[in-house]
Image (cartoon, helix red, strand yellow):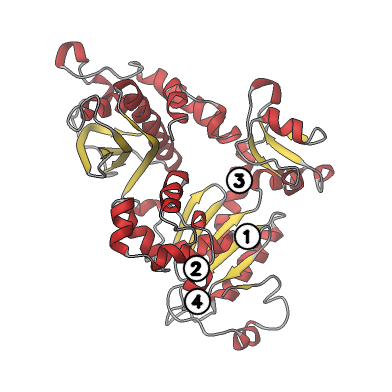
Amino acid sequence: MEETFSDIGNHGSNATAQAFLEPWLGKAILLVDLDAFFAAVEQLDHPAWRGKPLIVGGDADRRGVVATASYEARKFGIRSAMPSSTAAALCPEAIWTHGNYRRYQEMSQKVMDILYQESPFIQQVSIDEAFLDISPTAHNTEHPVLVAARIHRGIEKLGITASIGLSTSKTVAKIASEMDKPRGLTVVYPGRERDFLFPLPIRHLSGIGPVAQHELFRHNIETIGDLANADPLFIERIMGKNGRTMHLRANGGDDSPVVSEEEAKSVSHELSFAKDLTKTEEVEAAIAAIASKVGRRLRHKGLRGQSLSLKLRYDDRSLRSVQCRLPESSDDELAFTPLLLEMLGELWKPGVPIRLLGVSMSGFGKDEPGQERLFDIPSKDSEGTRKPLIEDAEKRSGLLRATDTVRDRFGESALQFGHELKTKDRI
């Protein structure tokens, strides 16, 4: 089904190695996932910490959370996003550090430079994860496995390790990267995607969270093979529009391209709820929490958009959306959240059950000249619209920079607004 490689290419010439490899026909997509990245960098910079349980995160006595744990610490059951107090109880002898995000960014860029040397078609998903299209062409006939092995060795020369998945699609490459951690290189050859995917639990498939998994379990669909072999119309009926994509991916049919940040068409986030939302307060809190995720991703990517969208799925699985154009490009959720709450009135009335909410931003072109600034939109008192959550743009910007810094260092749960806390228990 799949093959694992570790030292391929270390012995003999590339031509010799290529002669013994099965020919590769079609697309070749790999996913590079840096192993326990923050902890690995800390152990690289602090030799005395190597081989010991290490936790990067917030203080246990200040309601901190674990950002990353070394593999030595993971043996004690410690994982990312765990409360620091719990981690301290599981492993009292662990070494703790608050981390150095600037240093992590520096190492991440060195890894991305290695990937750029192999292909210009790179999609960085996060600071420690990226897709790369290394499909053979008429001008570049080198076997993808050799390219992947060279990347593997290049990253190790930096003093850290990566787990790499290689296959014909992003979906299969991502799952393959999780099969042999740490320091794994797992290859799923063209034509073997279904054999690889079918025995795996459905939780391995991207886009299937706890809510979707529970719904599929109710219909005796527990493995990716069960999902792939089910009637696609039935899956779409119980899972909505996303069911079609789930079924396609379960059959190894994901053909989504590797898209660089410059080519990004939209930045979005959505949440499904274990229990339908019906009250104004909880719906507005959820929208604010989702908008916060979108704003943070926009700033991480260095993007500012002008086209804002709100999407709702009701309890009968019907879907509606509304879109508006902002006066000026924005990456500031404290400013565009009030607009989303205004847009909500076009789609929903209190008491109507909501199963899913989504927010997206697109339109990343240049601003049109002579337009009002977003934070100067009239208040609800004068023109029927809501005021920004913080009216002073400079104060908003400072608050968002501060929260981004905290979350970058200690994880998404390290600092949360009230609307995020209200929404946390609903998903």
Where residue 15 sits: x, y (%)?
Answer: 62, 86
Crowd class of label 1 (few under 14; some 14 to 19; many from 20; radius 10 Å): many
Where residue 404 sits: x, y (%)?
Answer: 50, 31
Q: Which residue occupies 53% across, 61% down?
A: 175
Q: Amino acid at mark 3?
A: Glu
For the residues labelled 3 and 1, the Cα–Cα distance comes to 19 Å
- Sequence-first tag of 1 and 2: 1
Crowd class of label 4 (few under 14; some 14 to 19; many from 20; radius 10 Å): some
Relative vertical location of residue 287 with respect to residue 388 in this rendering, above or below = below
Of 313 and 12, nearer the camera is: 313
Relative to 211, 41 lies left or right: right
Provide the residue designation for mark 3.
106
Relative vertical location of residue 83 with respect to residue 157 in this rendering, above or below = above
For the residues labelled 1 and 2, the Cα–Cα distance comes to 21 Å
Element type at marker 4?
Answer: loop
Q: Which mark is residue 192?
A: 4
Q: Residue furthest top?
A: 381
Q: Quadrant of residue 234?
A: bottom left
For the residues labelled 2 and 3, the Cα–Cα distance comes to 39 Å
Q: Amino acid at mark 1?
A: Ser
Q: Name the quarter where the N terminus is drawn.
A: bottom right
- Depth-wise, is mark 3 or mark 4 nearer the camera? 4
Q: Which mark is residue 198?
A: 2
Of 86 and 107, nearer the camera is: 86
- Sequence-first tag of 2 and 3: 3
Provide the residue designation for mark 1.
163
Residue 256 in view, yes or no: no
- Depth-wise, is mark 2 or mark 3 nearer the camera? 2
- Sequence-first tag of 3 and 1: 3
- Sequence-first tag of 4 and 2: 4
